[in-house]
Amino acid sequence: MQKTTRVQHHLDLLSAEIFASTREKLRPDPAHDVVQAVFWCLQTEDSLVPRNSSQGDYRIGVIALKTFDISKIGVTDLDIQYKSSEKDLLLAVIDKVRLFDPDILVGYELHNASWGYLIERGLTYGIVLTDELARVHCDTQAILHDRWGYRKASVFRVIGRHMLNVWRLMRSEFDLTSYRFENIAFHLLHQRMPHYSFQTLTKWYEDGPSLLRHRLFRYYLDRVQMNLDILDVSEVVSQTAQSSRVFGIDFYSALTRGSQFKVESVMLRIAKPENFIVISPSRKQVGEQRAIECLPLILEPMSQFYNSPLLVLDFQSLYPSIMIAYNYCYSTCLGRIQPPGQDDNKFGVTHLELPKGLLGKLEDHLNVSPNGVAYVKPYIRKSLLARMLTEILETRVMIKNAMKDYKNDVGLIRLLNARQLTLKYIANVTYGYTAAAFSGRMPNVEISDSIVQSGREILQRTIQTINDNQQWGGKVVYGDTDSVFVYLHGRTREQAFDIGQDIADTITGMNPAPIKLKFEKVYHPCVLITKKRYVGFKFERVDDKEPEFDAKGIETVRRDGTPATQKIMESCIKIFFRTQDLSEVKKYLYDQWAKILSNRMSPQDFIIAKEVRLGSYRSLPHGAQVAHTDMSTDPRAEPQYGERVPYVVVYRGPNARLKDRVMKPEALLQNPSLRLDGEYYIRKQIIPPLERVFQLVGADIRSWYEEMPRSQKAMALSIAQTTNIQEGAVNRIDRYYASSYCLVCRKLAGQYRLTKLLKLCEHCSSLNVIDVAPCETSTSCQGWVDLPCDSLDCPVYYERRKVFQDILGAAVYEALVEDLEAHQQEINQS
């Protein structure tokens, strides 16, 4: 009888997270700490694999040591296995992987946890998990670390399967200041997840009652499922799979390789039928080619505040369109046109040898680029790159039209969207393939200069045409590579939309197809600061009533500052755009500065997060300094390559050095005697970016701060000092009095004796805020005030710590307990 083989047309993903009991405050170390339980979750479309009845498309299970008795915590409907030893547990994990045979192994952080921890822990028993988990068995006696994967994907490689490091994938997909699991879950899944320290989890496991062990169990079970939810919502797997199909490369290369590899893969498939061979130059040959002579046109903007409409027009896919319109390519280039007597036939990394008489025959059939390089016209030979880009752009249009016709088919829409994004990517990076003059695969300076100089000439003609047209009455105030900003002084917004469309149609008609200028939006009003830095109220349609705040390159969208800077700067700009009254901006800033100086703002808004690459610094930046401090007590605290390390700046006296005032946020929150350095944040983090914007309208932000009423500053500083009493200080009368501000809303509430503090202000007291204090309204978050959740990404955690420090820093414990009981009685009676 003939044996039939079941063909699989889908991808199976197996997510895993581990719990290992730790030693005191140290992180789990595979050299010492035993794996107590492995939580796994399988996502598959295979109908032969049974699911958990309450878990939808997932099958979820746990492999645990017998000491981790799940039966006592009331959890059912799961695939649970118990093992008598850790070695048996690791072998059970191997058996589970072989049984399900997943294509992809998933973990949120694969270097120090999840699969990586299991792999390193297996070495203590002589088990090489990278081989045991592979689909092809090989007798390797050591684990080979993938250094490229450490920077881009997973540090480990398993033959026949992919290992996805979720946090690193999210780092390349989204621009965030933190890539901790809790922050990713909030931004992608819109759920607040608690975070518990390893010390807390170990204490729950070793000494906790069934309730706490149940909470530990649910904590890991939620995380292992949400790994797959994050991949599903971000569509990383589907987009990468579609990209690999379009590029014609393998899944891992589509995930990790650069643009040159992908462009060449597409280009080679078109070149082969034409009998073209792609050369492989050495690094020396690449370095010996001509230097780049042409640069994109980037005008210095007329930096000022624009009260009338400002048009923004962009050329659609300018560089790909130029390559198609003028037939620029390796296969159509005849070299540089030179004066008689010169015979320099250098062409990119090689030399161009033309048959004698060829130029004479083609004299009337050439396109000559602005930098003096000749190319034959399309009817003589169709450019290889032009053919490739034409097919890409036309296919993308077809796909986008198909997406409009199948709006109700969610699965098909996701697939088509992944493909059109891939095509857009490959079209945009083709120019970079020809211009990669340092580490390029096949760079050609003549071609890249032709593209750039043609784009520069098109933009210059566009600017001149707009400025010379009296009917439009516009003036180009900024231009950048493929875009122009046109100011229409004295025109209405409705007129601006008509003029913008007329400009786009006129310029498009001046250029050969497919070069097209598109009218994008109207800014009204707007501030142009410097190159690539501007902000305005954006209107995309003439019937838009409410504008959208749109900023490029300034601190409201940058990640190298603090959230407080972003919020304050955005609010100031919005106030000025709406009122055009600097006194309103000044009033708002005085209020915010007073809050900062009095320590009445959340520390979360003052966290600075910078990427750290250990081993590549001469003098340590502050993020690396904080990382080294952690590593001195726990070597496992080393940050991942490119990980953002958060830190804050605290007050340590007037003459303290900045590097002595930097610490991690946890240290600030756990020490009531510390407070943020408000002067540093105001002078170094908030005022400089505000100055760059408001000096264009004649405002001196720094002098505003210097002129701030001394009484207001003094009161703010006294409040900060009162609510941050130094440890061991002598008892003073102000220790028994609160600040003049309500602990909840932070508004002025009158001077209360501290034992009456929990009456708060009248409004907050009426809300019974002491009784109801959940971590947030999200149903997914389990963190209440009495739980040791320490998520640095949850705003309520900072509020809890702030209230706790305010109370402890101002009253003795007995008085506080008495007042809390009295307040509770008042609530019960009411």
Image: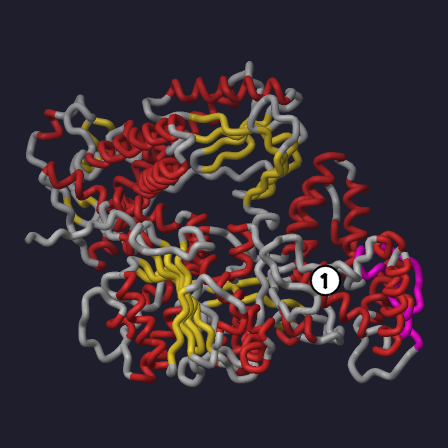
Question: In front here: 186 or 565?
Answer: 186
Q: Quadrant of the C terminus?
A: bottom right
Q: Position of residue 577 (x, y in %)?
A: 70, 36
| Residue 616 visible in the shown view | no
- The region drawn magenta spans 733-755
Residue 735's image quarter? Answer: bottom right
- Main structural element of the magenta stretch: helix, strand or loop? loop
Query: Callout 1: 10 Å neighbours few (<14), some, many (20+)?
Result: some
| Residue 170 visible in the shown view | yes
In the image, 24: left or right of 800?
left
Query: Helix, strand or loop at disc 1?
Result: helix
Q: Position of residue 12 (x, y in %)?
A: 32, 55
At a point 25% along the width and 44% down the height, the residue shown is 245
Q: Position of residue 507 (x, y in %)?
A: 43, 21
In the image, 735: left or right of 398?
right
Residue 564's image quarter? Answer: bottom right
Above or below: residue 410 compared with residue 654: above
What is the three-letter code of the residue carrying label 1? Glu
Above or below: residue 173 compared with residue 38: above
Question: In front here: 620 or 59?
Answer: 59
Question: In front here: 116 or 151?
Answer: 116
Identify the residue under disc 1.
799
Residue 582's image quarter? Answer: top right
Colour mode? secondary structure
